[in-house]
Amino acid sequence: MSLIPIRKNRRSAPNSSHGLFKVRTILTCLGVGYGSMAAAQVLPPIGKPLNPSVPTTAAIVTKPGSEEPIAKLASAVVNGKVNSSVVKPTLRELELETRIKELEQAAAQRTAREVSLEQRLKSIESMVTSRASASVSSVGTQVPGTAGAIDPPPGEEALVSPAFRGGNAPSSPNPSLPADLNIQGDPAPGFDVVESPQGIQTAPSLAAAAAGAAKKPDMPLTPKLLKGYAGVGPGFVISSDDDEYQLQFHNLTQFELRQYNDMNMNPTRSGFGFPRQWLIFNGRLTKPIEYFVATNWGFTNLSLLDAFINIHYDDRIQLKLGRFKTPYSYEFYAEPVNGLINPERSIFFNNYGPNRDLGAMLWGQVLNKTTDYAVGVFNGVRSGQLDTNNAKDVIAYFNSRPFEKSGVDLLKYWNVGGSTSCNVYNGTARPEVFRTNVPYPGDPTVSPLWMQFNNGVQNFGSEKLWSMHSAWYYKSASVIGEWFAGYETYAKTASLMKGTHVPNGGWYMQAGYFLTGEQVTSRGMVQPLNNFNPKSGSGIGAVELAFRWADMNVDKSVFNFASDQRWSNNTNVVDMGVNWYWNNNIKFYLGWQRAMFGQPIQAAPGVNASAPPSYWMSSSDMLWLRAQLYY
């Protein structure tokens, strides 16, 4: 037998109108004799896929020595034209004719679509070019479809057509387009396309495009928008999914009534007020970098309360920078103001405590987290903002729970430690007036005054303070005691170099007990066993008894700078009351405070020494009501 090879078209569908015409002519010519068989072998039946087992060449089989098929093929074409007398189309050939016409029509429609797409891509090209130049100075703008992308500005939603997003573009021409319309490297629908000033580029060219004119600079940074979540409790929280970035908002509101028994006090008056209105923003910028910002409205003063960052890679050693609580005294450094047993801290700290200051502090927990320490360097101005000299205040704090890991429940939460402050301060005496229940520099007119310096008195020289504390928590009980000592250097403005060291001291004993059974391990927020719910009657909240006796004394040498006829150098303050916690956010305090002065003082400063007895007092009593909201 002899084999006549016939080339198969490698494409499953025609790629041009010219190619379609050739196929049509050949198939028509092969309509006689073995023509139908040959065409059937070249093109599969309509609706059936190509048989992968068929070889790349087809053959017409003839008997040896027989040329009958060749003669019939030759007679089918006369002078290059189809001989209609010889060619008689079969049903199969008519089906092929119909199929060819459908392919021609589809090719024409696809050609028009490709032209439309080319025009659209050119339009996108100019848009991307202008956007690439603008993205260098535009913060947060990214190409849609990339990681961390944000929504494009209005009018640019079609920057990258949805039909051209997805995987990687093929390296070969699009097999679904005619050959003369296929653009080399033009990806099929579903593959990424990016525009550049040089023309249309496929996804493999993205790296080159990013390294060119559209490359984002390292400075200024173009931030990415991360996925995150929001939540409530405590406060309001917005965080990235991995918790690396976080913002929290908290609020502390305290509203109170101070009702004094002595109506002759001046300038002190009974009345309502806001001792604290804090707005707190805190969180982290990656987990090791924490921040805290708080503002405060206290009675009549608006101030920046705290503003610091805390570098926290390890619990054992952390670094705090900014304005924050100084580590002097247990009651100030370790006890949050919303968790105090009594509404305010003791009389000694309210007058002499360093309170907040600007500086840097190393702090942490060591020895299996049973010991807390802190040491910092500060400006040395009580609740100030700017230093008044080149000297700095060094403050250190130490607290240990020696039996925390012992398993002895009675002593497990016993704390013992101390703190110290060493400073040199030159400036107006702080405090200028001594008060019973308002921390410096709060408005002194809401508290009875028991000593005031004469005009022209300054702090000029060294200041030293010490403290020792013990705090014991067991089941529902809290028992805290602290002892203070130190000295201040005072001088008259006319003779600053003749300063006098004036010793001072004080102490307090404090106790709290939950009648409703809540367990205590330290001071802080309280979660009642049963929240207050008057509708169902299922709970009354948490009820805690509160007591404190506090003392402060200043050496009699202080009367070189203040009048011993109008003031006292010693005062004791007793507080008794009850805390009522509705839930972990709401707290009420009802109590009574009595201040007892070492000698009678003037109830109305400025009145001469021979004033009527009603202007003098040996003690002061106050009814204290306070409502607190914290979240």
Image (spheres, rainbow, N blue to C red):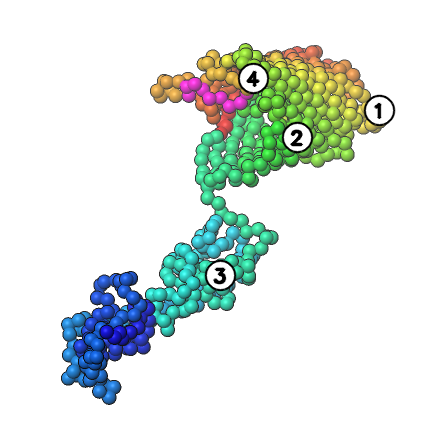
Disc 4 + disc 3, Cβ < 8 Å: no
**Residue occupied by mark 3:** 205
> Is any atom of residue 90 visible in this view?
yes
Q: Along the polypeptide, which appears first: circle 4 or circle 2? A: 2
Q: From mark 4 to mark 2, how far is it between C-alphas?
A: 25 Å
Q: Along the polypeptide, which appears first: circle 2 or circle 3? A: 3
Q: From mark 1 to mark 2, how far is it between C-alphas?
A: 36 Å
Left-right relation of 281 to 424? left
Answer whether residue 69 is magenta in the image.
Answer: no
Location of residue 336 in the rendering, given as x and y in whole percent from the top left corner: 57, 24
User: Foreground mark, 2 or 3?
Assistant: 3
Q: Which mark is residue 362?
A: 2
Q: Quadrant of residue 169?
A: bottom left
**Residue occupied by mark 1:** 498
Amino acid at the residue labelled 3: Ser
Amino acid at the residue labelled 1: Lys
**Residue occupied by mark 4:** 405
Location of residue 335 in the rendering, given as x and y in whole percent from the top left corner: 58, 22
User: Foreground mark, 1 or 3?
Assistant: 3
Instruction: For mark 4, give the secondary structure.
Output: loop
CA neighbours of label 4 inside 10 A, class few (<14), some (14 to 19), many (20+): some
Disc 1 + disc 2, Cβ < 8 Å: no
User: Foreground mark, 4 or 2?
Assistant: 4
